Image: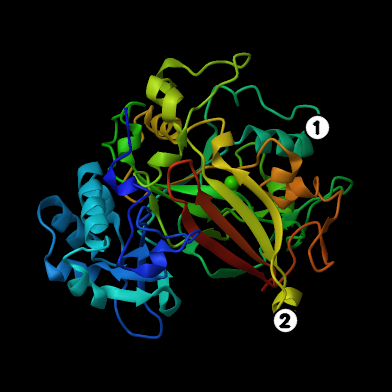
Amino acid sequence: MSFINETHDINLKSWVSSANVAGNDFPIQNLPFASFRRKGVSEEFRGGVAIGDQVLDLAVVAAAGIFSGEAQEAVEAANAPALNEFMGMGKTHWSALRLALSKALREGSEYQGALESALVSLDEVEYALPCHIGDYTDFYTSIYHATAVGSLFRPDNPLLPNYKWVPIGYHGRASSIDVSGQSFPRPKGQTKAPDADVPSFGPAKRMDYELELGIYLGKGNELGDTISIEDAEDHVFGFCLFNDWSARDLQAWEYQPLGPFLAKNFASTVSPWVVTTEALAPYRTQWHRDENDPQPLEYLESSHNREAGAFDIQMDVLLESEKMRTEGAAPSKLSESSFKHSYWTVAQMVTHHTVNGCNFTPGDMLGSGTQSGPEHEEAGSMLELSRGGKETITLNNGEERKFLEDGDKVIMRGWCEADGFNRIGFGSVEGTVLPAK
Ligand code: CA
């Protein structure tokens, strides 16, 4: 089964010349969606597509009426402050619009004249959440992260026995998810030092980030119905970068027996751009389960999932301290990893989430869980990089960290590369920790 079509052709060039610059995040093979408006202008947010250093305004495209059939229906649905209706239309509409946009933005397109006025510079826009996120579930799919964190919280029993059988997750809180640029006060709460008799109350001392992907559900399912693993990817609209901010000292005290609560729900930040599942086709890869590990139960198993269910999405994390900002110094890179290391695939997450009949609605989001790689340097959280605060991380400018300090901005980036295909990028997700209120 091939997922590659003419929209992925490496030879495609756009009449938007910045899209043809090697290494840029938004070549014509990408075409990610966001909800945007011009900065400082009182106007509605609406759908946009990134192309080079520009945003193609889908309100203008919809009004131009240059597409037909499902592509026109899709672009009209995407001309809205939130993309839920478009996301809920399903794969044939998503694909029709992608193909129409690809053709319209290609060099030599007859629509260049009509669409030049639909471009807004990326520098001049601001974003909203791409959709209303009704529900959000965070998974835990990196076995390297689960083992490293488990060994800090439970040295004698790092990886719990269900991990290799069940895609572990918990229901998160959608109300505090915001788009890149989010800043929030350091959370306060209960913590208890290991040698203390009773807990104390105050600002979290162990503020952390988690390097994750967000996965947006498109078409949902009826309550009581299950999405089979064969159909699972048809329900996945696309992917974003996701920072699941975490207060480790709150987490350590509260997490048993029901899991994360106030350690996680004070803020979570998504990147503005949603890279579609279709755009990611060239970067699919085989999914392996070590032969010495339990193999998935039948409802989580398919040949397609084995052959192409994983995605090689590379990600990195950078930290920009207040001092770096003041001195104009570059952010300091903390780590780099890839989603290809995930123990469970997106299809397995979707199927597992609905196997009991739980329903998805368009725009629901899944977090992938912190994507730590096999090596210590590939850890997706500061908790792991500092080995639970026992080691110091030295930044480029000589500053030191064990956890985040007030004023720290965390920047996450993502991109995909594969032989014979153009590089595509996710842009970035950025967020800043402010002093406690
Ligand atoms: Ca998480």
Does residue 108 appear to the left or right of 332 in the view shown? left
Does residue 112 appear to the left or right of 26 in the view shown? left
Image coords of residue 71 (percent x, y): 17, 54
Say which residue appears at 39% left-offset and 30% top-offset: 351
Q: What amino acid is found at the position of numbered circle 1 in the picture?
A: Pro
Q: Quadrant of residue 400?
A: bottom right
Q: Is residue 301 something one can see in this rendering?
A: yes
Q: Quadrant of residue 105?
A: bottom left
Q: Secondary structure at mark 1?
A: loop
Does residue 125 appear to the left or right of 254 in the view shown? left
Say which residue appears at 38% left-offset and 40% top-offset: 281
Label 2 CB less than 8 angstroms from ligand 1: no
Say which residue appears at 81% left-offset and 45% top-offset: 387
Q: Quadrant of residue 206?
A: bottom right
Image coords of residue 290 (percent x, y): 60, 19
Q: Earlier in the sequence, mark 1 or mark 2?
A: 1
Where is mark 1, residue-wise? 155
Does residue 20 appear to the left or right of 254 in the view shown? left
Question: 10 Å neighbourhood of mark 1: few (<14), some, or many (≥20)?
Answer: few
Image coords of residue 321 (percent x, y): 72, 70
Work out which quarter of the rendered image holds the C terminus and state it: bottom right
Where is mark 2, residue-wise? 326
Note whether 103 is above or below 90 in the view shown.
Answer: below
In the foreground, 147 or 75: 75
Q: What amino acid is found at the position of numbered circle 2 in the picture?
A: Thr
Work out which quarter of the rendered image holds the N terminus and state it: top left
